[in-house]
Image (spheres, rainbow, N blue to C red):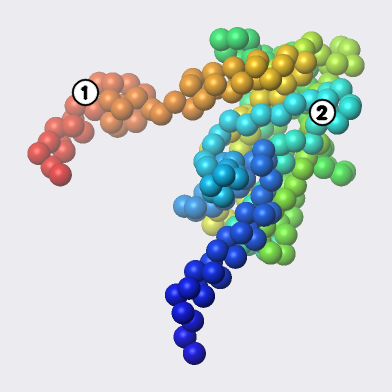
Amino acid sequence: SRLRPAAIAAMLLAATSVASAQLQQGDIVLSVPKGAIETGVFAPDSGEVVPDRVFGGTFGGSGFAGFTGNPGFDAVPGTFAPGTRVGFDAVAGLRRFAGDGLAPAPDAQLVVSFLTLSRTIASEPVAGFDLAVQSSGGFHRHLSFTLQGTSSPLPPAGIYVIELEMYSTDSSVERSEPFFIAFDFGAGPLARQEAIAWIADHLLAPPCPADLDGDAVVGGGDLAVLLAGWGGP
């Protein structure tokens, strides 16, 4: 017999609720809406995932200075193919927010680890590591982030920023766009929010709308593109 529309709606709502229940507020949610990994956050009020590329973390919340396991990484079942792996690469060295930009942090390094796997983000980009997708096609992992000083046990207080890309071992899934995690190490939540806002405004800004040919210059090529489309829909 055919299912009634109300029954179908109830089933869809139940499936959505189960998927949403597996997402933790504050974690980085991974999805693959258009063939590439996209990062976002779970909004519990709407039950939806909102795309985002700047996230926050706080060292010391667990009682250990310079350590945190947040934010974690989440993906609902069916996001990835079972048997594949998902990982990260650091596409820039560790940096510190300087109030009006990101500056190198030569006196600090960040160790990212999971069980026996470990990578150190210092002054240069570094290849990360990948972890197995769950049998359901979901993904839920909390990496360990440990901030260290290069000449002392701990570096100065501040907002420390890493820039990552996520990848899948599935050749049909493209890498994510670069995204940022701003960690508060004794600087306070207000300073972290200032860093997040600066990154969003200056490093995630959309390209210049007048650069029609995408060569980072507004010139004759853009005029040619404009004239070629003149009078079109």
Which quadrant of the view contains residue 162?
A: top right
- Mark before the other along the chain sequence, 2 or 1: 2
Q: Gap between marks 2 and 1, in whole Å?
A: 54 Å
Residue 140 visible somewhere in the drawing: yes
> 190 or 107: nearer the eye?
190
State the image coordinates of residue 48 (x, y, percent, origin top left): 54, 48
Q: Residue at x 87, y 44 (%)?
A: 115
Q: Where 41 falls versus 214 (above or below)? A: below
State the image coordinates of residue 25 (x, y, percent, origin top left): 66, 42
State the image coordinates of residue 32 (x, y, percent, origin top left): 54, 52
> 57 or 227: nearer the eye?
57
Residue 166 visible somewhere in the drawing: no
Q: Residue furthest left?
A: 231
- Residue at the disc numbered 1: 220
- Residue at the disc numbered 2: 61
State the image coordinates of residue 146 (x, y, percent, origin top left): 82, 28
Which quadrant of the view contains residue 29?
A: top right
Q: Residue at x 21, y 33 (%)?
A: 225
Q: Is residue 116 left or right of residue 112?
A: right
Q: Residue furthest front?
A: 6
Q: Where 83 falls versus 49 (above or below)? A: below
Which quadrant of the view contains residue 28?
A: top right
Quarter placement of the C terminus: top left
- Label 2, residues with CA under 10 Å away: few <14, some 14-19, many ≥20: few
Q: Residue at x 77, y 15 (%)?
A: 186
The local secondary structure at tag 1 comes to helix
Between tags 2 and 1, which lies in front?
A: 2
